[in-house]
Image (cartoon, rainbow, N blue to C red):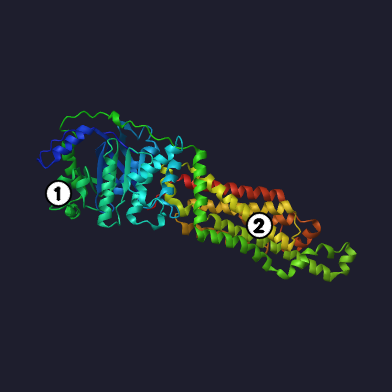
Amino acid sequence: MLRICRLAWTRTQVLFLGDTGLAKWGWNLYRRRAVLELQNTYFTIQKGSDDIHLLDNVSIKVPAGHFMAIVGPSGCGKSTLLKLIAGINVESHGHVLWNGRDLSEEDDLEPSEIGYVPQFSIAYDALTVEESIESSVRLRVKTKNKDHFYGLVDRALESTGLEAIKDRQVKVLSGGQKRRLALAMELVTDPVLMLCDEVTSGLDPRSEAEIVKLMYDMSRNQNRIVVNVTHSLQGLDLYDSVLVLHEGKVAYHGPPRAVEHYFSVDGAENIYPTLMKRSSDEWQASWMKRSEQYYQNSGMNFVPNPDMESVAAKTPDAVSQFFALLGRRFKILFRDLGQLGLIIAILVGFPALVILFDLDGVDQIKSLSDSLPRSLEQMEQERDIITENLNLGGLVSGLVMFQVILLTLMGSNNSAREIAGERKIFEKEKLGGVRPGVYVASKVAFLSLLVGLQSFWMWLFVQTVCGIPSGTPAHLILLLLVNGAMTAICLGISSLAKTADQASLLSIYLVGFQLPLSGAVLALPVWAAWATRPFISAYWSWAGVMDSLSPKYLRYVDQVTETWLSPVMICYGVLVVHIAFGLFLAYVGVKRGQWQE
């Protein structure tokens, strides 16, 4: 939800600053008029029983074609304010207006009208510069034809000076080049509001100056406002205005040339020490006495600027976004040799592990049906054969369970990091108009192909070598379902986890509980079985495969496992419920915002 405001600025008459250039600044505001305004805005969080005001009674006005810096000591609310303007944070009290429209009560700006550049990289390392910008266009702009599409890409490359390195992968770019790329990816929609959060942080002085100059050039578009959060107090001269925050309160908002006079310092670098000499309440009270001289003393009429009513770029439909996300995911997979190698190694190695589980018994499994006794009398006479059959029944049960457990491990590996590992990028893309449901659908499509390939190969390889005497369709379907269930559940965990490492750890724990709690190897107490088995995917897949065995095999399995089995159709149903629940968690997780930076 985007928060922005309308503002009309006046030719400023400032008594206490004299002719320091402020009058000229005020006249420029008069010519442009103002479109962004925050009125008595608060952002409050709960800490125990106390209300903590991260932003406290913030009132500012910004005109069109304006370049504003937000500065202040660490923890003063700079990024919080930027996120509030962007709609990531929602104001607790007050109003945010854009060109006369109260966004707190009316519709927000379209996602394409806002460019938001966070502190972290919003591009994938495996893609090139040009591919990253193309991806941004596909997800954010509904283009008319190929010429329109490539025209937007070329314009973004040219305006940010990236044409010469458009074929380089993101992972080899310097810090300054990555910042340029982030700006280019936002420019594809030609936003009227560009919000930049610490985009110069960590850069050398030359790169910092280049990025600030680039943002300044962007602001010269008469309909665009560029706001930059920065710790640096160097190079403020390029900004049209500087907003100084102290403990969530406005201490100053005016032209950079008047900053030193206002704070009575010899250089801008001395502002922060000076701020600490007075309380934030005192600074706020001082500014509130003088702010009217900036905003109202000239008697200007506060009217909307009709030039700001731009035509927002249309967001692509759900189908276009789906194929853009899916195509990008496969492109990243095939370029990430480490992940691709791991998937192939698991695909080949895990079925081989099932065979090694009891290689000596493979030939006996194939001849099990030939050695079965045909009558009760014969059974009593052939005790050795019965004993052998019971052992082989346990082997069949163990081989199937081993298949199932390894497929749950595959499912965990498939999706544990799938969302958590790219969460920050997704949050940025969601802010830019990517639909959460479409994002989840693209993940489901990608993972479904992995699940299908893994499960089919596991079934084909083990069935060919071992000849497990199970109903072929049921066995394969249950392997697909258990892999799909664990993949879906871990995808849900990935969407809810705060970090990729946390998601991986939780997923591994979940797989670790599958074998002991299934009861297929070690019998559980009745109460424990009823309490845990509904949640254990491995049990339902194993039980379904066992139930699909012919009765002459099943009776031996049933004797050696000492646990109850379930009809195949019930097993199907439970595993489908597991899949549905995992996908529901995934959707809930991506729908909910997570902006940890």
In the foreground, 180 or 15: 180
Please give left or right for residue 5 compared with residue 350 in the image: left
Tell me the quadrant of the picture where the N terminus can be found.
Answer: top left
From the viewer's perspective, is residue 149 above or below residue 200?
above
- Compared across the picture, whether 527 is left or right of 126 comes to right
Q: 534 above or below 89?
A: below
Closer to the observer: label 1 or label 2? 2
**Amino acid type assigned to the residue bearing label 1 in the image:** Glu
Quadrant of the rendered image containing residue 241? top left
Residue 89 seen in render? no
Graded by Cα atoms within 10 Å as few (under 14), some (14 to 19) or many (20 or more), the crowding at tag 2 reads: some
- State the residue at coordinates (34%, 45%): 158
State the CA–CA distance, disc 1 to disc 2: 71 Å
Front residue of 254 and 334: 334
SS of the residue at dot 2? helix
Asked if residue 535 shows in the view, the reply is yes
Instruction: Classify mark 1: residues with Cα within 10 Å, few (<14), some (14-19) or many (20+).
Output: some
Residue 46: image tag:
none
Q: Position of residue 520 (x, y in %)?
A: 68, 61
Mark toward the start of the polypeptide (1 vs 2): 1
Q: Could you tell me how many numbered marks the image carries?
A: 2
The three-letter amino acid code for the residue at tag 2 is Trp
Q: Nearer the viewer, residue 522 or 38?
A: 38
The secondary structure type at the circle numbered 1 is helix
Task: Give whichever of 515, 545 is nearer the camera.
Answer: 545
| Residue that sits furthest to the right in the current view | 377
Q: Position of residue 524 (x, y in %)?
A: 66, 62
Mark on residue 457? 2
Label annotation for residue 260: 1
Residue 164 spot, x, y in % from top left: 36, 51
Q: Position of residue 32 (x, y in %)?
A: 23, 33
